[in-house]
Image (tube, helix red, strand yellow):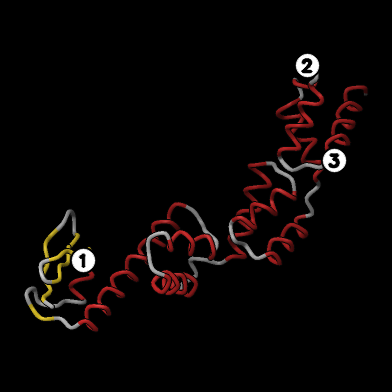
Amino acid sequence: MIISYKPGKSNKIHIYIDDEYQITTTEGFLSNNYFSSGSEISQEEWEELVEKINYAKAVNKCYDLLAIRSHSKKELFEKLLKNFDYNSSSKAIELMEEIGYINDEEFAKELLDYLMNNKKISKSIIALEMKKRGVDHEIYEQLISDADIDDIGVAYDIINSKYIRKLNEEGGRNKVIAALARKGFRYSDITCALDMIEEDEEI
């Protein structure tokens, strides 16, 4: 097999085998893994080169995704698998763990803080969000327990900040109950919060 190269946009390099396009890499990668253009390359050497290219791409994808926001291990791995093979994705995840760029417990703490203070949702929905992001059950259950979230108090704050005017509308109480139910609050907690608000108004 004969390997050859053609320049692409920016610092990209397109690699060809026997004049047929195969894969794209970067000038930086190629400088460290170079075969002279027009030279012979064995099947074993080619497969090893492709594996290295895909791994480098998977690592760069990790950096890109983590620059946007934190990810759990499972969440990041699943995103990699959409573009890369299992082996390259696994090795990239291992590297991210080794250098401390992914840590499920730290990720869960950040997510819990965001969901509690920004999204204002119930404990049950927080647990579902954690599960959806791939956080281990034991990690998020312990964090939620330690946070000692008061669903009645959270519902009370939400009603006061977002729905207090709606309570005076026709059917307003039922609409508020429905709105908080969608956030995962139990009926008993919602009605308790509503009763507290009504008592506040009577004082």
The residue positioned farthest toward the left in the image shown: 38
Residue under circle 3?
189
Residue under circle 1?
22
The residue closer to the viewer here, 40 or 170, is: 40
N-term-proximal mark, 2 vs 1: 1
57 to 153, vertically: above or below: below
Picture quarter containing residue 61?
bottom left
Q: What residue type is labelled 1?
A: Gln
Image quadrant holding the C terminus, namely top right
Residue under circle 2?
169
* Label 3 crowd (10 A; few <14 / some 14-19 / many >=20): many
Q: In this view, does 131 lie to the left or right of 160?
A: left
N-term-proximal mark, 2 vs 3: 2
N-term-proximal mark, 3 vs 1: 1
Q: What residue type is labelled 2?
A: Glu
The residue closer to the viewer here, 87 or 100, is: 87
Picture quarter containing residue 168?
top right
Q: What residue type is labelled 3?
A: Asp
